[in-house]
Amino acid sequence: MTQTVPPENPEALTTPGATAQDPAAAGRGLPAALRRRVPKYADLAPLMQFKKPDFSRAARLGRASTIWDLRDMAKRRTPRAPFDYTDGAAEAEISLRRARQAFQDIEFRPGILRDVSSIDLSTDILGKPSRLPVGIAPTGFTRMMQSEGEYAGSRAAEAAGIPYTLSTMGTASIEDVAAAAPDGRNWFQLYLWTDRDRSRELIERAAAAGNDTLMVTVDTAVAGARLRDVRNGMTIPPALTLKTVLDASYRPAWWFNFLTHEPLTFASLSRYTGTVADLINSMFDPTLTFADLDWLRETWKGKLVVKGIQTADDARKVADYGADGIVLSNHGGRQLDRAPVPLHVLPEVSAALKADNSGTAVLLDTGIMSGADIIAALALGADFTLIGRAYLYGLMAGGRAGVDRALQILEQDMLRTMALLGVSSIAELTPDHVRILRQ
């Protein structure tokens, strides 16, 4: 027996023995939920709840679900020169793209039927606890990105229970950052000068201000070719050319903050006078060798970390010279383009140091844009990670509140990734949890 479809209602199939002239019979074959009816107001009312628009900074930042969302906000709110200084890298920017691609090429390998009702993201790094396995990396000219600069970064790190690293090229002094975040764990990053007395002065100031870790950067024999900065004609402070004035017309809040706060200076180098180019040329010492680490080890009594390691051989040598930690880093792609990708060399470096029983901590930066990236690095052998651009995007998007939001996003990412991997603590992560799809 066949069913017929009434032409006036194709959705209704007639039951055996029913005709198109019998609507009641035609409808008996459908569940009640599929029969059409006139909607009642009581059914529509719950769907018609319109929220009042909220244009506050908190609401705007709350709509950011990823670091990329914060980057989009930052780009809209920041003049091109300071945004590109943060966002850009050296030459063709191949190193930066490869570093980010390396994290995208990670395949997670989850375990199932594990109790992940409670996730612990805390870890120990360089002898002290950190609530999260990530700290804030040193970034120069930070108050140029947004007027709160290093103060926002250090206070956000203090609130999050993670380390904050002040750059030698910072725009807040060692003492001011320590006063702004007195309960935070503050580290200081150093470029070794040819003039060792200047270096010694900065080291002594860092120690006096309570910094427990000195991070010396060693991948800057000369400055990298950061072509976005060259094309933008970036100066410190930003110059009011016709181009920058036109750019500012779309970003009045940035210029208002910039012009109504203390002028931009290299706060840790306040006694220096000269152009930015002269400063960089005098700061980056091309004669630096491993022997200089002996001088540092004698001069600095706290934890010593060497930043800019890119091979297993150099990691071993630095450990032999007494470094407490290394940072696998290609300077965020801002120095040598086509440099090794830190995530790619991580397994080899981690294995080499463990084989030597050096006890040297392995930190990693460059390319991190999500909490899942951090978890992948930890699984592959990193003890800790650092973020630069990721927190600066938050800073430019909303000052201190934007940095807080960036850290919240990363923490939520990490919690979710850990739970889905089936692990409840950092110590449970192993290389078995990840696979690099290509290199």
Image: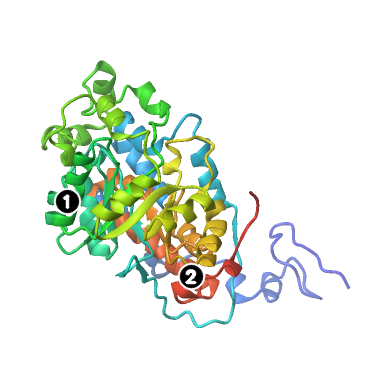
Question: x and y percent of residue 277 in the render?
Answer: 28, 25
Q: Nearer the viewer, mark 2 or mark 1?
A: 1
Q: Is residue 407 above or below residue 388?
A: below
Around disc 2, counting alpha carbons within 10 Å, would you say few (fewer than 14), some (14 to 19), or many (20 or more)?
A: many
At 21% from the left and 21% from the top, the residue drawn is 240
First of labels 2, 1 by sequence position = 1
Q: In which image quadrant can residue 37 be found?
A: bottom right
Of the pair 311 and 42, the residue shown nearer to us:
311
**Residue that lies at the very extreme toward the right in this rendered image:** 1
Residue 48 appears in the rendering: no
Q: Which residue is mark 1?
A: 204
At 31% from the left and 28% from the top, the residue drawn is 281
**Residue that lies at the very extreme toward the top in this rendered image:** 242
| 346 sits left or right of 274 in the view | right
At 49% from the left and 66% from the top, the residue drawn is 417
Q: Amino acid at mark 2?
A: Met
Of the pair 389 and 415, the residue shown nearer to us:
389
Describe the element under mark 1 as helix, strand or loop. helix
Describe the element under mark 2 as helix, strand or loop. helix
Q: Which residue is mark 2?
A: 418
| 55 sits left or right of 321 in the view | left
Question: x and y percent of residue 108 in the render?
Answer: 59, 64
At 19% from the left and 32% from the top, the residue drawn is 255
